Amino acid sequence: MRLSDNAFYLLGASPYEQKYRIIDKCEDKLFEEDDNGIDYEAQQNILLSPVKRLSEEIRWFFSEDLDVYERVKDNVKLYEDAAFEMQSPLAKINLLLYSMMEGELSRPFHEVVLAIDTFYDDIDYEAVLKEINEVREVAGISDIKEVEQIEKEIERLRNDIRQVFQYVAKEIYSLCYTEDALKVAEETYNCGQYSDIATEFLGMYHLDIQNCINDTQAIIQSLFSSNHGISCGRLLDIVGPHFKEICELEAPLMEYYSIHDIMSASKEVFEQLREVSIDQLSDTNIQESVYFIETLRQLCISNSKFVEQLDTDLSQLREFSTIVQYNEYSIQLNAMIEHMQREVLYEFGHESRTLRFYNDYFLPHIVVLINKIFSSLQLSTSQKEELAGVAAYAYLHMAWGLAYARNLKLAKNNMEVARTYANKTNNREVIRGVEEQYESIKKYYNEIGDTIDSSSYSSRTSSSSSRSSSYTYSESSSSSSSDSGCGCFIALIILAVASSVGGPIGFFIGLAILGYFFNDK
């Protein structure tokens, strides 16, 4: 659609001029010596025909807008700015299209597309019909009877707009074209504004990139076939650059595809890559899968829906990784505690030298492992509660062993640490259970002539336990203690059996049984 194609322009006629003036204009052109190949009589017949004339009128200017055009008609560089001065949305579209076809566009392509999109939506068919009929009355041309004629001709103008867009798109770099399309999509389709001109532009862009998309997708499928069975990370290294290209090309069209029910090539490849990652996921390669998803996320960063899906995948992978690592640590931790339990039982009635060794060296290793779990994993509340029980269980177990070995100082220290862990659980039953075991030990040693200073049994935290984070523990502890009177060997047997059967809970129950015997006297 060029200005030089309009019959009003070719004859130099105004839409207000009557028939005889149009004929005179045509004769003047025919008598000119220049033979430029223009059929002026055909242009005259168009303007004199009430039906054919409408096409030229829709693409021309009237009243004040005609004055604006007359002012800038000899300088195409002014067309673009002048278009925004006009009153009629139709006139604005026309002058912008003429400016684009002349290659005089100072604004970014997407801004002009969005402006035309807005102007097109603002067209009032009834107002256009009224204005054209008023002009025709002055010119002595039969008026238009039905507004549907206006609607049909403006629909044809929409096709002209698409052709002008195609013309401009061929003159710009492909990268700029994609960026323009993305901005048009963001301002319209991504905002739920499925207007006619935006649809035309994005539909045109879709067709323009389709060959490139098809070629790139064919390359990707060939790479999938020839590299079957390799690691997901290596596959992504090979396929990634091509996938990124498709994502960037299709980024402006994701909402367009969704509305018009079109399957995107990037989504198909995206799902294939995710499927490979899922198929190869196992307990031993979680970190590799996390790296794969993070890399894939960077490749498709231009697609918000893909990024959202991958963020969900990453969250689930990290949660799975935490569970796997936690289980591995738990196995180590339980093995260490079981080993310590056996040694404490074995040492009953013997020298406390080995018990002291376990207190000084073995028990701190357990604490280091607990701290490692807290520092390296994102734990759930239930996992933190479980760890709290394990820590209290370990220290209480060592405290009882040391107490029976008559190493009162170390027994008291372990009880203090156990109490600190119990306080951090925020569980009243656990805290009460620890306090009762402390009172039982204190009473026992008071009765046999030794004393543990209760004033020194404060809520201070040992150096190892102070590094642990605050957490809660929901398991219930044992019931209150009674009198003691059982021998040490039987007491340890009760403790070992209870803890081996019931874990931390069983241990607390065992402690309650011991408390009963201690308080019995």
Image (spheres, rainbow, N blue to C red):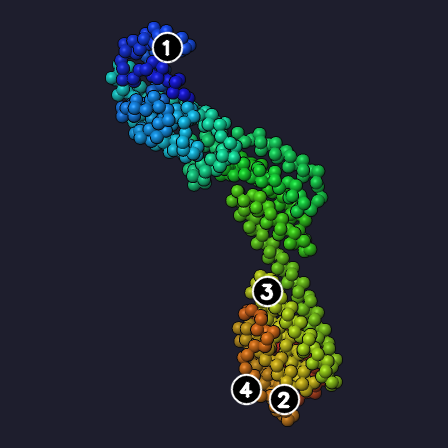
- Real-space Cα distance between discs 1 and 3? 87 Å
- Real-space Cα distance between discs 2 and 4? 17 Å
Q: Which of the two discs, 3 and 2, labels the residue nearer the N terminus?
A: 3
Q: Which residue is mark 4?
A: 455
Q: Which residue is mark 2?
A: 444
Q: Which of the two discs, 1 and 3, labels the residue nearer the N terminus?
A: 1
- Real-space Cα distance between discs 2 and 1? 123 Å
The amino acid on which the numbered mark 4 sits, given as a three-letter code, is Ser
| Label 4–label 1 contact, CB within 8 A | no
**Quadrant of the snapshot with the N terminus:** top left
Residue 271: give x, y in percent of width and height.
60, 42
Examine the rendered structure and indicate whether residue 432 appears above or below residue 41.
Answer: below
**Quadrant of the snapshot with the C terminus:** bottom right
Q: Secondary structure at mark 2?
A: helix
Residue 399: give x, y in percent of width and height.
65, 81
Q: Quadrant of residue 392?
A: bottom right
